[in-house]
Amino acid sequence: MGKGAMILEAKEGKCLLLQKQPTTMPAATARIILSVDKEKEKAFLEMLKLFDFVKVESKEELLRRFIQNAPKNVPLTEADVVNEVMEHRYGKKQ
């Protein structure tokens, strides 16, 4: 793709190159969740990898990163957790 990311527009079944933009990552990125037909998932992921501005992360990778970055020594007791769950579910603490 060279030094710029291509921006494509789908029109009448054809993709048109509109412009090139710099490949530097923006200061803020958006996380989105897509639902894709299971039969077309592999092809869709391969297509996304062509774009240098898209990062594809599996659910397993997301969970692994979450666990890796989670606090290790949280000062909560089991009773604290039960109280929070009960409050959110039923609107009252035990």
Image (spheres, helix red, strand yellow):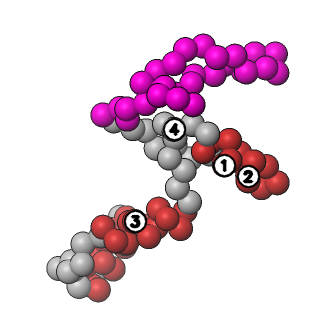
The disc, 1 or 3, on the residue closer to the chain's N-terminal end is 1
User: Is residue 92 in view?
Assistant: no
Please name the residue shown 30% across and 67% down the image: 69
Q: Nearer the viewer, residue 33 or 77?
A: 33
Q: Give the range drawn in magenta.
A: 1-27
- Three-letter residue code for mark 4: Asp
Picture coordinates of residue 51 (x, y %)? 57, 37
Label of residue 52 in the image: 4
Picture coordinates of residue 58 (x, y %)? 56, 60
Secondary element at tag 1:
helix
Please name the residue shown 27% across and 84% down the image: 79
Secondary element at tag 3:
helix
Disc 1 from disc 2: Cα separation: 6 Å
Disc 2 from disc 4: Cα separation: 19 Å
The residue most toward the front is: 2
Picture coordinates of residue 47 (x, y %)? 68, 41
For label 3, the residue is 65
Hey, which quadrant is residue 34 in on the image?
top right
Circle 1 packing at 10 Å, graded few (<14), some (14-19), many (20+), is few
Circle 3 packing at 10 Å, graded few (<14), some (14-19), many (20+), is few
The disc, 4 or 3, on the residue closer to the chain's N-terminal end is 4
Label of residue 45 in the image: 1
